Image (cartoon, rainbow, N blue to C red):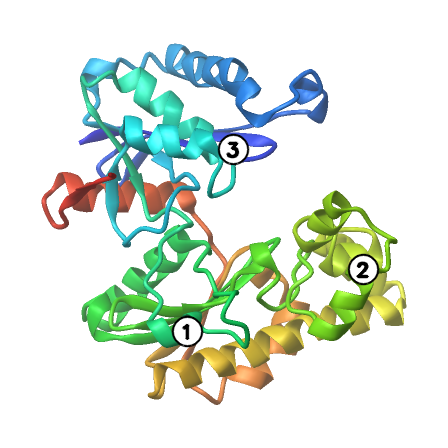
Amino acid sequence: MRNLIINIGGSSTKLAIYEDETEIVMETIRHPSADFSEYKTLWEQYPYRKRVVEDFMKRHQVSISELSAIVSRGPVVKPLESGVYRINEKMIADMKGGKYGTHPSGIGCEIAWELSKGRVECLTVDPPCVDELIDIARITGLPQIKRVSFFQALNHKAKGHELAKKLGTEYDKLNIVITHLGSGISVASHKQGKVIDVTNGLEGDSPFGLDRVGTLPAGEWMRYCVSGEKTKEELDNLINGGGGIKAHLNTNNAIEVEEMIEGGNEYAKLIFEAMAFQVGKGVGAASAALGAKPDGIIVTGGLANSKRFISYLKPMIEWMAPLYIWPEDNEVLSLVQGALRGLNGDEDVKEYS
């Protein structure tokens, strides 16, 4: 089966053609910030982003008629079960309405929908709003506030299936702790195929990340919010985009942080180690939530490439269960594998409604 894969991020577009699980061609197109300066909203980028996809198809002589499916990274929509979903008008309406948030990946879904025009399957896999939390995991100390599931579900689920394959079993027979180390950090308890508990780096309910503020002492945060020093928009930016390593060291680039440490910056070392310390505590909590010794702990995402960061984290968690450091976060391949499970009938393709 030949599939076109679309993965649109904030400053890049990844496009690929796969024949089953074999990569035929893949390109990452990086977009200078100046290219977006004229657009006031995310959705105004649509014509620009669509041209990028169409140019890729022309360069590689991709015809819609030869495809089995067009597959896009998932949008921000209502809470969903894990799985493969058919992109439809209802999904596009919900993501463009912005009720549940916005993300550039939503543009990819609309492009996929427009290109397919009912001629081929139009799919997405494990969007970030996958919600399998058990009821007890949603409860906080205030009845007005509930914990929300929002995480890198695509990579989490793909790594869960990868470990099951390695161990010669099925994902839904394992108890796994997976932490994804990106700009934000998610730590999840995968219990027999369901993510029963997970941190939410986007909303400040997690270890702090490269530019996410993470969990804060509630009283101090409340006093900071009412001090009048920051507007609501500035506070939102601190939670998602301006906190974490960036707030401490004025960069969200882990390589630059390591260079600071190698240059003798003791404060940078303290902050980097503190982030690992919080991840380690998160892994311990996620293990407890399983109610059983994990069959494995997986550390994935870009930051898992940092030998220094892993050297801080490893002693905290390696005693709990077999540890797998798998930095590769191949979202494109994860989309391919998920779509094939649906196209081959290994999973039902779900309808968004």
What residue sits 46% from the left and 52% below the top? 329
**Circles 3 and 2: CB distance less than 8 Å?**
no
**Circles 1 and 2: CB distance less than 8 Å?**
no
Query: Does residue 329 appear anywhere in the picture?
Result: yes
Which circle's residue, 1 or 2, is located before the other in the chain?
1
Q: Label 1, on which residue?
A: 137
Residue placed farthest to the front in the image?
A: 144
Q: Based on the displayed image, in which of its 4 quarters is residue 15 positioned?
A: top left
Separation of residues labelled 1 and 2 (CA atoms): 29 Å
41 left or right of 5 in image: right
**Circles 1 and 3: CB distance less than 8 Å?**
no
| Crowd tier of the residue under label 1, counting other residues whose Cα lies within 10 Å: few below 14, some 14–19, many 20 or above | some
| Crowd tier of the residue under label 2, counting other residues whose Cα lies within 10 Å: few below 14, some 14–19, many 20 or above | few
Element type at mark 1: helix
What residue sits 34% from the left and 47% below the top? 334
Query: Does residue 25 appear anywhere in the picture?
Result: no
Q: Label 3, on which residue?
A: 104
Expressed as whole percent of the image width and height from the top left, the position of residue 54 reads 41, 13
Q: How many marks?
A: 3
